[in-house]
Image: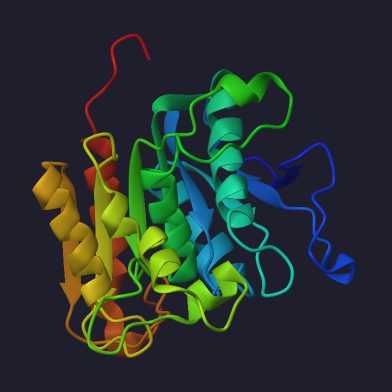
Amino acid sequence: MKETSKLMLWSTERPALDPEKNFQPYMNTYLLDDGAVHGAVVIFPGGGYQVKMMTYEGEDVALRFNELGFHAFVVDYRCGMGAYPFPAPVEDALRAVKLVRGHAQEWKIRPDRIATLGFSAGGHLCCSTAVWFDKIAADNGDEYDSVSARPDAVIPCYSVVSAFAAPCPHVGSFRNLLNTEEPSEADLHRLSCDESVNADTPPAFLWHTVEDAVVPYENALRFAEAYRRNGIPFELHLYPYGPHGLGLGTQDAFAEVRSWPALCAEFLNKIPAVPGC
C-alpha cells in the first residue's frame, strides 16, 4: 500500500451555521501499489451525524479492504447539530465518489467498480449515495463536476435507513441531520432512503445484527424489501447476536461478524463489468 494521503474535498470553504464549528471535509486515501487495476470502496464512518468513528469504522475497515484487493478511501464529512445539516453530508459523499472516479486512471481504479460503504448514520449516508446521486448537486467548479457520482454498489452496515423502521425506530440521527429536535413527518419520510429506491439504484450488500438495540435491524429489512420490489440485486446478512457498532467484529464474543468483509468482497467482484472500462 502507498503512504496514506489526505485529499480535501472542496477547493473553497464551506461555512457552518455556527462559524465556530467550521470544518473542511476531506478523505484519506489507502491506495494499493501493486501496479494492477482494482475496485475501490469509499467509507463513511458512523456517529449519529454528530461525530465520526474514524478508526474502527474508518481506517481499520480501509486496511481490511486493502487486504481483500480494493483501494479504499475514508471520508471525514461535514455534519453536526448547529453546524452542517442536510444536504451537506450528502454533498461531501457524492463529491468523494466523483473524485475517486475522476482519478480512476491515475490511481488505477476500475471506474465501474466503485462502492460506497457506511456504518450506522454513515450507513444512511451510504444509502443516500444510492438514491440521491442524481438529485443533489456536488459541484465545485472544476473538471470533476461532470463525473458521475453514482456508486456501482452500496454497503450499508447496521445502517440507519428509515425513520419508521420497527416499533421503536431510531430517530436521533435524523434530528442531527435535519438540525431540529422535532423533525416533521414529511422530512422524515423524505430522508428515509428506502422510500426513494428506484430502477437506477445500484446493488447493495447489507448486514445487521438482530440484537442491535440502537438501530433496529428492520432498517436493513426495509431497504432490502425496497430492492426486491424494484428488481435490484442485493445480499442481506442478519447475524443473530451482537450490539450496535461492531465494525469489523473484533470482539471474540461475536466473531461470526468477521465474515462480512470477505462476503462483501465476493459480492463486489460479481458486479457486471462495463464494456470498455
**Is 204 on the left or on the right of 96, as rendered?**
left
Give the quarter of the figure containing the C terminus: top left
For the point 35% across and 64% down, the residue is: 189
Up/down of 83 relative to 39, above or below = below
Where is residue 175 shown, x and y percent of the image?
53, 77
Which residue ends up furthest to the right in the rendered image? 20
Q: Which residue lies furthest to the top in this view?
A: 276
Residue at figure coordinates x 68%, y 19% from the top left: 143
The one nearer the camera, 60 or 123, is 123
Quadrant in the picture for the N terminus = top right
Left or right of 56 on screen, residue 224: left
Residue 54 at what x, y percent from top left?
61, 67
Which residue appears at 21% of the width and 83% of the height?
A: 210
Task: Name the residue: 57% across, 69% down.
Answer: 178
Q: Position of residue 249 (x, y in %)?
A: 37, 76
240 over 142 or under it: above or below: below
